[in-house]
Image (spheres, rainbow, N blue to C red):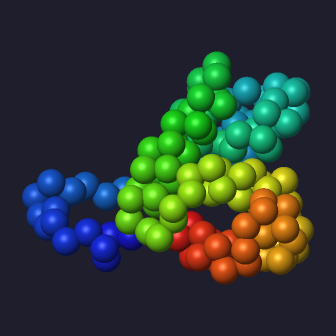
Amino acid sequence: MSNLIVEPRTGRKVEFRLFPLSVGELLAEEGPLESRRLLERRLRYGMYPEVITNDDPASIILEVANSYLFRDVLEYQTVKGPDALRRLLQALALQAGGEVSFNELASLLGVDKATIDRYSIAL
């Protein structure tokens, strides 16, 4: 996506990578019983620090989706239907770890296979 933006960022850009917390870090901080109690929540929302420390992790995930996916991807890629993109992401999340068929996704979402292919490239 950065290749599509022609505005130079010289002097205005700081780039860093934030990795999720590791299971070892969480075990050391809270112990095995608390880690086990929170396992389902962490599998659902991930283990980024802000998600773990926030009482409403769904709001953090929604904010990331809205700011990255539904602003940047829609603006800089050939994605015309935000509702179809949102339904595609939900369908993909439900199939995590399994094989994905573009034909099956297209049928499920009521769009053609080419649209699924184009949206998957944008993501």
Q: Position of residue 114 (x, y in %)?
A: 66, 80
Looking at the image, residue 45 lies above or below residue 105: above
Q: Quadrant of the rendered structure where residue 48 is? A: top right
Q: Position of residue 28 (x, y in %)?
A: 70, 35
Q: Which one is nearer the viewer's eye here, 102 or 7? A: 102
Image quarter in which the C terminus is found: bottom right
Image quarter in which the N terminus is found: bottom left
Q: Which one is nearer the viewer's eye here, 88 or 65? A: 88
40 left or right of 57 in image: right
Q: Quadrant of the rendered structure where residue 84 is? A: bottom right
Residue 61 seen from this side: yes
Looking at the image, residue 112 lies above or below residue 94: below
Residue 24 seen from this side: no
| Residue drawn where x is 49% and y is 50% of the image | 70
| Residue drawn where x is 64% and y is 29% of the image | 57
36 left or right of 31 in image: right
Q: Which one is nearer the viewer's eye here, 78 or 60? A: 78
Looking at the image, residue 39 lies above or below residue 24: above
| Residue drawn where x is 44% and y is 68% of the image | 77
How many numbered tags mark residues here? Answer: 0
Q: Quadrant of the rendered structure where residue 81 is? A: bottom right
Q: Residue at the far left: name it.
A: 11
Q: Position of residue 98 (x, y in %)?
A: 89, 68
| Residue drawn where x is 47% and y is 70% of the image | 78
